[in-house]
Image (tube, rainbow, N blue to C red):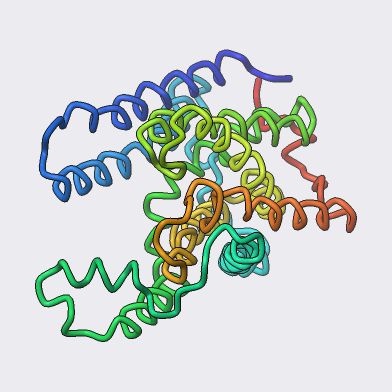
Amino acid sequence: MIQRKSLTWFLGITFLISWPLFLTPLLFGKMEPVNKQLMTQGLWAIAMWGPGIAAIITTLFVMKQPFKSLRLNTLGPKRFYLWAWGLPIGLTILGGLLTLLFGMAKLDLSFTMLRDAMASAAGGNSVPVETIVAIQILFAITLAPFINVLFALGEELGWRGFLLPHLLPLGQWKAILISGIIWGVWHAPAIAQGHNYPGYPVLGVFMMIVFCVLLGTIFSWLYLNTKSPWVAALVHGSVNAVAGLPILFFKPGFNMAFGGTLAAPTAWIGMGLFILWLVLTKRLPVLSQLEETGAGDS
């Protein structure tokens, strides 16, 4: 049985923490663009911990359950961490290839976009652009996912570690769908400012919801197999590390809202096919003890 009080407190605290931080850049006005971007990234990184803080507060002070009930002391089967690390890389590559196949962008192996950016920076021409690209790719697929866990855990402790298990009494598919929609809506202030879907402040919000439902289904599959927020944090960190890599290989001027990144519709195809494979091979829904116990609500 769902405990509405705990869910209300969790969602209220989450949005109360995160949305003001998402909206603060609107107050920056005519701040120098580089400084504004750095400030925005910093504030939004802090906002990522809104769901995690809400999960901790709700668990300890509303539900009066021990901290260990958030399962940070649990890892689960290790093979799912390989999925968490590698799957976003594969989905990103597929999304980039489909962007080219559908003619939404043109391949540019001279890396014009990055070359132009380096030309405007002090000493930018001292290092070959091909070297920069190689370093960016290597870092994105090796160290970056694990570094990103520091911030991604803030979201995943809330979305998959708290919200998903407490929605499971509704049924696994409903829990996955509802948690994905809420996750997408949570991004709305950032999306309205041009994040992920530049030029589409309204449509972009709905596109983000679709993206979060698809991606959240994959995250939920990993969480339900491990009962651990760490695997969700790793896959989230990997997504954040590699999602924009295909842009390096495209000529400037393409519509980034609809192709080129993992958040774009061209990449939804790969996510949808992967979810279909999970269903057809009976890997989803997952037989979960969490679903059977109702996440311990009393």
The quarter in which the C terminus is drawn is top right
Measured as percent of width and height from the top left, residue 138 is found at: 42, 78
Query: From where the camera sits, is residue 209 visible?
Result: yes
Which residue is rendered at x = 51% and y = 49% of the image?
A: 72
Query: On screen, 43 above or below 110?
Result: above
Left or right: 211, with 201 as reference point = right
Query: Is residue 107 found left or right of 167 in the rendered image?
Result: left
Residue at coordinates 52% horizontally, 58% vertically from top-left?
260
From what the image shows, is residue 187 above or below residue 234? Answer: above
Left/right of residue 173 with respect to residue 107 in the rendered view: right
Q: At 59% across and 51% down in the image, what residue appears?
A: 228
Instruction: Look at the image and tell me whether residue 84 can be seen.
Output: no
**Quarter of the figure with the N terminus:** top right
**In the rendered picture of this protein, how many numbered marks are placed on residues?**
0
Location of residue 50 in the rendering, given as x and y in whole percent from the top left corner: 39, 33
Residue at the image point whose x is 61% and y is 61% from the top:
103
26 relative position to 272: left or right: left
Q: Position of residue 105 (x, y in %)?
A: 53, 62
Q: Looking at the picture, how far across and down is residue 250, in whole percent?
A: 46, 67
Residue 244 location, quadrant: bottom left
Q: Is residue 154 above or below residue 276?
A: above
Near-viewer residue (162 or 262) = 262
Front position in the image: 91 or 256: 256
Q: Quadrant of residue 209?
A: top right
Q: Given the current orientation, which residue lies at the most extreme top position?
A: 5
